[in-house]
Amino acid sequence: MVDLHTHSTASDGTWSPGRIVEEAVRLGLRAVGLTDHDSVDGNAELVETGRTLGLPVVPGVEISTRWNGVTFHLLGYGIDPRIPAVKAAFDRLARSREARAPRMLARLQDLGVPITLEEVRAEAGTALVGRPHVARVLVRKGVVRDVQEAFDRLLGRGRPAYVDKDRLDPAEACQTIRRAGGVAVLAHPGLIEEDDPALLRPLLDHLVELGLEGVEAFYSRHTREQQERYRSLAVQRNLLVTGGSDFHEPGSGGPALGTGYGSLEVPDACFEALARLLKERRPELGPVLNPGL
Ligand code: AMP
Ligand code: ZN
Ligand code: FE
Ligand code: FE
């Protein structure tokens, strides 16, 4: 079993990349991938800890995009962040997040919720501010009982303190990932179908033209029927099948590392096929993907 979709303190998770690798070893996972939102800053520590502990790791990123008014996420595995065009794209996303945080807090203050940018920045540490950081501050201050209530009442899409952020165009996101030597994968298609059931197939075909190479068929919130359906959509198009939990924080009611909501089981073959493709494209990732050899 593997987990190819996790978030660390480099974005809005609560475990450091190193801790994620340690816990993955403890759980007996065969490989773990890191996919922080719009940031590759945690990948160096992931790779370092993977090497130390002898666990195969996959450096990655999760990029927010928008197409025809629908927002969705693309995962980029094995990207080399040193490429200038890649750096520029991430810098732009960082600036957009920087601009969003004070606007979100202004909305909350208008609603009579006492919260400051300093508190939120302290919660985020070195990471870019995301809504979960705001939510955790609200929990600590007793404004809401838990993170979920913060999203349901205030921060979720359509709620009064929601402020959207800049997103890359999917063409730009795919191109950025490919230019960086990476593999672009459509994240959690089930969430796209929740928004608009008719959109997934045309979107997938469009993304394949842009260079998409995989579909995240295994995901905490996908039913078995969805897993099977997304897997066959991928196989029909000759795409990789990947999977992961979307772990952010233990004991928060969200998905757990490796097992999601309890029944997730991402086959080792998902990692093996991805690793094969990545090793062809970026041979220097060999020791990261196979630290035992
Ligand atoms: P941001 O990138 O700052 O817009 O925050 C997105 C993150 O917020 C997601 O990755 C989840 O961790 C979390 N999130 C978004 N929507 C919800 C929701 N409705 N309930 C709980 N968590 C959410
Ligand atoms: Zn998140
Ligand atoms: Fe996502
Ligand atoms: Fe995610």
Image (cartoon, grey):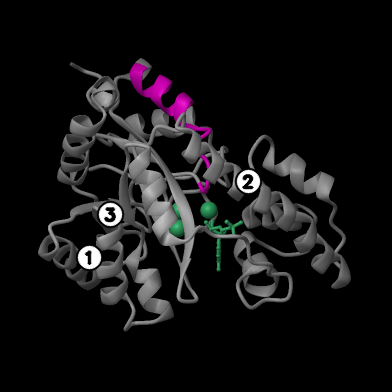
Q: Outermost residue, front direction?
A: 85
Is there any visible trace of residue 271 in the rendered image? yes
Q: Where does the image place residue 145, in percent across and percent down from the top left?
A: 69, 63
The residue nearer to you, when weighing 254 against 160, is 160
Is there any visible trace of residue 257 in the rendered image? no
Res. 154 image quadrant? bottom right
Q: Is the residue 129 above or below the residue 80 in the image?
A: below
The residue nearer to you, when weighing 106 against 167, is 167
Res. 272 image quadrant? top left
Q: Is the residue 63 above or below the residue 124 in the image?
A: below
> Label 2 sits on what residue type?
Ala
Q: CA distance from mark 1 to mark 2?
A: 33 Å
> Label 3 sits on what residue type?
Gly
Residue 44 in the magenta stretch? The answer is yes
Q: Where does the image place residue 79, in percent across and percent down from the top left?
A: 37, 36
Question: Mark 2 — residue?
Answer: 94
Q: Secondary structure at mark 2?
A: helix
Question: Mark 3 — residue?
Answer: 211
Question: Mark 1 — residue?
Answer: 227
